[in-house]
Image (cartoon, helix red, strand yellow):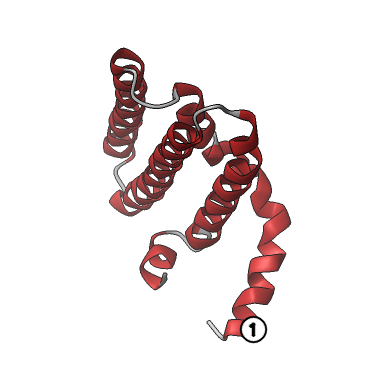
Amino acid sequence: MNRLRRINPILPEFLGNLLLYGILVQVVGVWFVRDKLSYTLSLWVGIGLAIGMAIHMAVLILDAVDSGVKRQAQVKATTFCILRYVIVGGVLALATYFGLGNVIAIGIGIFGVKVAALLYPFTKEFFAKFKKEVGA
């Protein structure tokens, strides 16, 4: 947890929001699909991709701030942003082409990055109270 906090102070809470979103979507969504196993596995593949994207973005921001060279940071950020989209697109394309899992559920999981960002202002206080109780 401290390692994530060193990358970005809000990253642990952000990932907590992402996992909370995944659990809620899992519990609610599993009632509306026929193939529950495929939905579950696909959703958590999407959540895993979202977690990877969030950590990658935080590391990239840290590197860009630390580099001090504006042009180099812009090129690196653009390159790695494109790489993230290629990986996500590749996973979705492979899942679609080979019929592996539920592509919509993967997309819903990936969308968790946006939801976690929107939830952060509301859950920030909860995590602050939790840290005080645990003593972290």
Which residue is at a point 37% across and 22% down the rendered structure image? 92
Residue 117 in sight here: no
**Closer to the camera, 84 or 91?**
91
Left or right of residue 5, residue 71 in this image: left
* Identity, as a three-letter code, of the amino acid under mark 1: Glu
Determine whether 14 is above or below 114 in the image.
below
Q: Quadrant of the N terminus?
A: bottom left
User: Looking at the image, how many numbered discs can be counted on the residues?
Assistant: 1
On the image, which quarter does residue 81 sit in? top left
Which residue is at a point 46% across and 42% down the rendered structure image? 47
Which residue is at a point 29% across and 50% down the rendered structure image? 67
> Residue 117: x, y in percent?
60, 45
Label 1 neighbour load within 10 Å: few <14, some 14-19, many 20+? few
User: Which SS class for mark 1?
Assistant: helix
Determine whether 5 is above or below 98 in the image.
below
> Residue 120: x, y in percent?
64, 52
| View extreme (top): residue | 97
On the image, which quarter does residue 30 sit in? top right
**Closer to the camera, 132 or 64?**
132
Residue 89 in sight here: yes
* Residue named by callout 1: 133
Determine whether 30 is above or below 22 in the image.
above
Left or right of residue 86, residue 24 in this image: right
Which residue is at a point 28% across and 17% down the rendered structure image? 98
**Closer to the camera, 76 or 25?**
25
